[in-house]
Image (cartoon, rainbow, N blue to C red):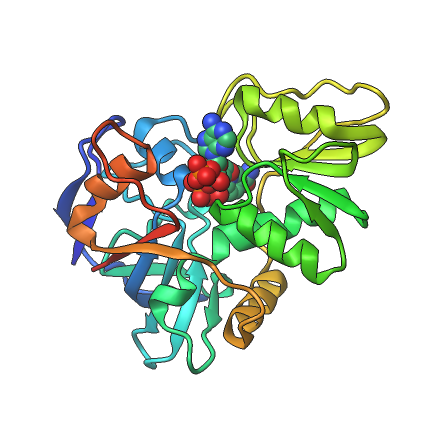
Amino acid sequence: MVAVGVDAFGGPLRPLRLPVIAAGPGEVLVRVAAAAVNPADLGMVAGRYRWADEVRFPLVPGYDVAGTVEATGQPVVAFTSHKSTQRGGYAQFVTLPAELVVPLPDGLTAVDAAPLPLAGMTALQALDVLGEVDTLLVNGPRGAVGSLIVQLATARGTTVVPADSPGPVDAAVDVVGGAVARAAFDRVRDHGRYATVVPEFWIPGGVFAAERGITPRVVSVRYDRIGLMGLVEQLAAGTVTAKVGAVLPLTDAAQAHRIVGRAEAAPRVAGKIVLVP
Ligand SMILES: NC(=O)c1ccc[n+]([C@@H]2O[C@H](COP(=O)([O-])OP(=O)(O)OC[C@H]3O[C@@H](n4cnc5c(N)ncnc54)[C@H](OP(=O)(O)O)[C@@H]3O)[C@@H](O)[C@H]2O)c1
């Protein structure tokens, strides 16, 4: 099969010819129709990512895929759980533990669904960490994780407050990291709640010391099959959307990384980039 990956940290991302891994017991071979590009994929390629085991090369990045189960033709969406599996979505096929693979309802295309797993589960888990709050500030409400937090929080009856509005909030969630995180933290009322999805090792400069009775929490996504199935249902019902900004051929993965990494001269794209093998 054709995949895209790197032979060493730092790249370059290049097309690879790799064997298709036959599905073992409890595994599913997915024919990939769409693979979303996440900021984490850039970290994987750069060597800034933390895997459970020593990384194996060639490294094929990619957390989010949608396609069909090769054996049955069933449309599915899947989270590759790259941290533990090291099986990436930037490929024509990916072989995954069956629990990571979720059926796709009628009416949803692979491109619609591919951006959902990582960003959606992260958004759900950020809201779970914060618990019930009346007012919530999200400092990147147009990003993948941020926009899903806004949609899910609003559906729960929480008032989402713009970052540039005045006054304290019950809770804030940071999706940007670094120095920008501080402004969100500062808006939280005393004894309020604050969470970030951007750990210090990922983008240094965030604020993680407790202050004014607020204990910052760092969200590190974990796979949640029930949560993902719920998100897929909401996507199919049209009650949440995961915005797709561009659809590119898989072989343009390097260009997708330049766009996501906001490289000089790269075009700006609002929404997820989805790669199609
Ligand atoms: N902890 C975890 O398990 C986990 C899981 C998923 C993602 N993440 C991390 O969460 C972050 C967001 O991911 P994503 O997929 O949502 O990325 P994304 O779609 O690229 O969104 C990034 C957001 O940050 C905003 N932003 C970037 N730089 C900014 C700045 N200097 N000032 C203000 N806003 C800025 C962007 O705003 P504009 O587009 O308007 O510029 C956008 O809203 C990434 O760092 C990612 O690695 C962590």
**In terms of depth relative to the viewer, which is nearer, 277 or 179?**
179
| Viewer-nearest residue: 105 or 191 | 191
Residue displayed at 13% across by 46% down = 15
Decide: is 111 above or below 8.
Answer: below
Seen at 69% across and 54% down, the residue is 153
Quarter occupied by the C terminus: bottom left
Q: Tell me which corner region of the image, top left, top right, bottom left or bottom right, holds residue 256.
A: top left
Q: How many marks?
A: 0
Question: Horizontal and vertical percent for residue 144?
Answer: 48, 48
Residue 29 in percent (x, y) is at: 33, 66
Vertical order, 235 against 203 (above or below): below
Taking the image as drawn, is residue 52 in sight?
no
50 displayed left or right of 225: left
Q: Is residue 225 left or right of residue 97?
A: right
Q: Which residue is drawn at 80% across and 18% down?
A: 211
- Using the rendered view, name the quadrant where residue 56 is placed: top left
Q: Give the x, y percent position of residue 217.
A: 70, 32
